[in-house]
Image (spheres, rainbow, N blue to C red):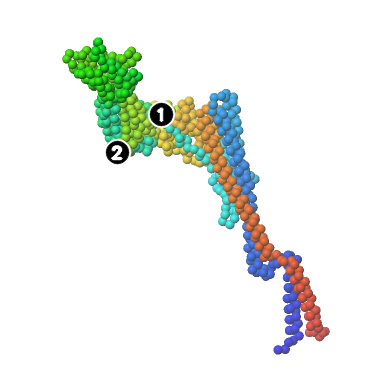
């Protein structure tokens, strides 16, 4: 192949250009300090470079979001701390004013101080940062809390502002004012007890606050300790309290000298021991029950049975006796020991006391008397005087003595509150009837009823007055219907405990306050006075102090505690978010350092190597120029062509 001059020329120019490009590329690297100045410098490195720069840009945005969120969280934390301190001050005032040691001037000053606290709370609730309200949700340009004479209404929404702090990681950066200032701290009336009385129509299933009493077996025993008689009573078929009472009394019968009834006051059954035509005693009657429960004189415990000249005499010692049978045995034993035949002790003809009978013919002329005037054993036993030939002792009038006990593992008597020993009229344990909508108002307050009047219910900026004094109200349902139809969005119902009524607001964006509106103190009576939220509680505390209502002020102390607990909980939430932000920020800053280093490794030039390479390329380029000038020596003819 023939090599022409043009070929040599073109090849030389190509090599010179390539050397120049290499030289210029290295020179650009040295001047910029970057290994990659154009994508063509390193296509793969350029791809990594772009990814690293994208990640750095994301990190910077995340850090900016965290900085913004941290600012809001710090403001929340400070504000919630101030709110807790304000409610702590309000609690101290409520505690201090709940006694009678302060006059009207002091109470008015305290009311003004609480009003000032309320104003500060509202100010903190309406706090803003750069013109954006902190507690308004998405409506950051709308003031969240609007106060009126009757209450407070929340004007924000429930929108949450989320900040993206990393890939697929978001943090809620705002608090909703409705959840803090108007959150239901308690249900008004949830702990109210209207003390429903026990009626004959009360279902057994409603006893024990609706737990009922298991009467599936339903038997228990009643033992008459005076007569040593046991009655077994079966009430397993009872469905109402009247059924229980009737079943017990029918099975006992009048001869049992014991009956049960519904207590005149309260919610229990009452045992009524009764006395028949005679107070019968038996050999098993405890002597401690004699004489109406006074017993007999056992201090001396002795008496004499003798004739006029004391030629026949027996000293009877009953100090160790515990029953009538023991007394009779002691008398007969003493007579036998003394050799007195034909004289015996036993029960009198009426079965009400003791008797001594002399069957000797002629009678021995015996008389019963005390050992000394210091003792009263014989008279306590109703046995003083002569045997002519029989001494009929007086009625020993034993006190009632019954033992009510369950059989085996059954607990019927215990569950009904009627177990134990009965010596007199005895009121049993409380059976706690469940309050229902059908409960009669007259049965409340332990069947004494209530004198009801008017209550005031405020819901945000709306108010309603409910008059509960109507004689047409006969049941709890009537009471609830009157409250529920007052025009406010509330629900009155029987509380969960089944002991009273409660009032709940169906709107979560406004305060709820229930108070008295006349001297009847009906809201107190029904146990629904108060407020269910922290703002309403402060407003009501001002009213309580102005009206010198110490009972209400004391009740609101608990609300102040609940409010502080809620604020602590909210502050803990803020704290956890701040910790998460700080943790994420530290991680992002470390990630930024790592990515920056990786970016530097990809695009930054090694200056020592680059400078050395620049000198090398420069020398190569100069050598190429010199070599080219020697190879390509053009003549005038070459230029003319």
The tag earlier along the polypeptide, 1 or 2, is 2
Instruction: Measure how far apart labels 1 and 2 are at the Cα level.
Output: 33 Å
Identify which residue, 332 or 593, lies in the foreground.
Answer: 332
Residue 608's place in the image compared with 435, above or below, is below
Quadrant in the rendering for residue 135:
top right
Secondary structure of the residue carrying numbered label 2: loop
Within 10 angstroms of label 2, few (less than 14), some, or many (20 or more) residues? some
Residue under label 2, please give it: 217
Relative placement, left or right, of 173 versus 626 is: left
Determine the residue positioned at 39% across, 26% down.
448
Secondary structure of the residue carrying numbered label 1: helix
Residue 364's place in the image compared with 284, above or below, is above
Q: Look at the image and tell me in which quarter the C terminus lies.
A: bottom right
Residue under label 1, please give it: 445
Q: Look at the image and tell me in which quarter the N terminus lies.
A: bottom right
Determine the residue positioned at 37% across, 27% down.
265
Relative placement, left or right, of 256 versus 560 is: left
In this orientation, does residue 198 appear?
Answer: no
Identify which residue, 167 or 322, lies in the foreground.
Answer: 322
Which residue ends up furthest to the right in the rendered image? 636
Q: Position of residue 215 (x, y in %)?
A: 31, 37
């Amino acid at each position: 192949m023939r090599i022409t001059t043009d070929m040599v020329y073109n090849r030389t120019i190509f090599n010179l250009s390539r050397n120049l490009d290499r030289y210029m590329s290295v020179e650009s690297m040295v001047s910029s300090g970057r290994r990659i100045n154009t994508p063509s410098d390193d296509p793969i490195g350029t791809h990594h470079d772009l990814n690293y720069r994208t990640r750095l840009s994301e990190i910077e945005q995340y850090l900016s979001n965290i900085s913004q969120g941290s600012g809001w969280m710090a403001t929340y934390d400070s504000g919630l701390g101030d709110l807790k301190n304000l409610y702590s001050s309000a609690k101290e005032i409520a505690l201090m004013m709940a006694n009678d040691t302060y006059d009207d001037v002091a109470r008015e000053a305290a009311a003004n101080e609480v009003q000032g606290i309320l104003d500060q709370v509202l100010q903190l609730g309406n706090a803003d940062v750069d013109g954006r309200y902190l507690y308004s949700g998405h409506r950051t340009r709308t003031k969240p809390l609007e106060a009126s004479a009757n209450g407070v209404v929340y004007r924000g929404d429930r929108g949450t502002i989320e900040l993206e702090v990393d890939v697929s990681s978001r943090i809620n950066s705002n608090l909703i004012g409705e959840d803090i200032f108007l959150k239901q701290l308690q249900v008004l009336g949830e702990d109210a007890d209207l003390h429903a009385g026990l009626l004959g129509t009360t279902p057994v299933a409603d006893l024990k606050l609706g737990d009922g009493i298991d009467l599936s077996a339903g038997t228990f025993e009643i033992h008459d300790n005076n007569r040593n008689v046991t009655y077994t009573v079966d009430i397993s078929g009872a469905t109402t309290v009247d059924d229980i009472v009737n079943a017990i009394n029918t099975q006992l019968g009048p001869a049992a000298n014991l009956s049960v009834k519904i207590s005149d006051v309260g919610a229990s059954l009452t045992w009524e021991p009764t006395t028949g035509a005679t107070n019968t005693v038996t050999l098993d009657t405890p002597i401690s029950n004699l004489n109406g429960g006074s017993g007999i004189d056992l201090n001396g415990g002795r008496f004499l049975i003798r004739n006029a000249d004391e030629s026949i005499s027996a000293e009877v010692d009953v100090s160790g006796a515990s029953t009538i049978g023991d007394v009779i045995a002691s008398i007969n034993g003493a007579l036998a020991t003394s050799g007195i035949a034909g004289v015996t002790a036993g029960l009198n003809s009426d079965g009400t006391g003791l008797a001594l009978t002399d069957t000797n013919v002629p009678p021995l002329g015996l008389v019963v008397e005390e050992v000394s005037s210091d003792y009263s054993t014989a008279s306590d036993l109703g046995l003083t005087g002569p045997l002519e030939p029989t001494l009929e002792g007086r009625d020993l009038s034993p006190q009632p003595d019954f033992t009510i006990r369950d059989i085996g593992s059954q607990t019927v008597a215990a569950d009904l509150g009627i177990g134990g020993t009965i010596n007199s009229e005895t009121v049993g344990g409380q059976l706690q009837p469940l309050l229902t909508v059908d409960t009669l108002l007259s049965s409340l307050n332990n069947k004494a009823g209530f004198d009801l009047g008017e209550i005031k219910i405020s819901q945000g900026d709306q108010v309603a007055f409910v008059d509960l004094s109507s004689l047409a109200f006969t049941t709890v349902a009537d009471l609830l219907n009157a409250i529920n139809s007052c025009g406010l969005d509330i629900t009155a119902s029987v509380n969960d405990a089944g002991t009273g009524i409660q009032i709940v607001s169906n709107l979560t964006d406004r305060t709820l306050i229930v108070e008295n509106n006349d001297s009847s103190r009906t809201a107190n009576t029904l146990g629904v006075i108060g407020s269910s939220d922290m703002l309403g509680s402060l407003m009501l505390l001002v009213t309580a102090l102005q009206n010198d209502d110490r009972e209400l002020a004391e009740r609101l102390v608990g609300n102040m505690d609940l409010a502080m607990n809620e604020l602590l909980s909210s502050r803990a939430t803020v704290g956890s978010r701040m910790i998460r932000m700080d943790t994420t920020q530290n991680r992002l800053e470390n990630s930024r350092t790592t990515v920056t280093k990786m970016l530097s490794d990809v695009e930054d030039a090694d200056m020592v190597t680059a400078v050395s390479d620049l000198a090398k390329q420069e020398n190569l380029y100069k050598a190429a120029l010199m070599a080219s000038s020697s190879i390509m020596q053009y003549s005038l003819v070459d230029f003319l062509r």
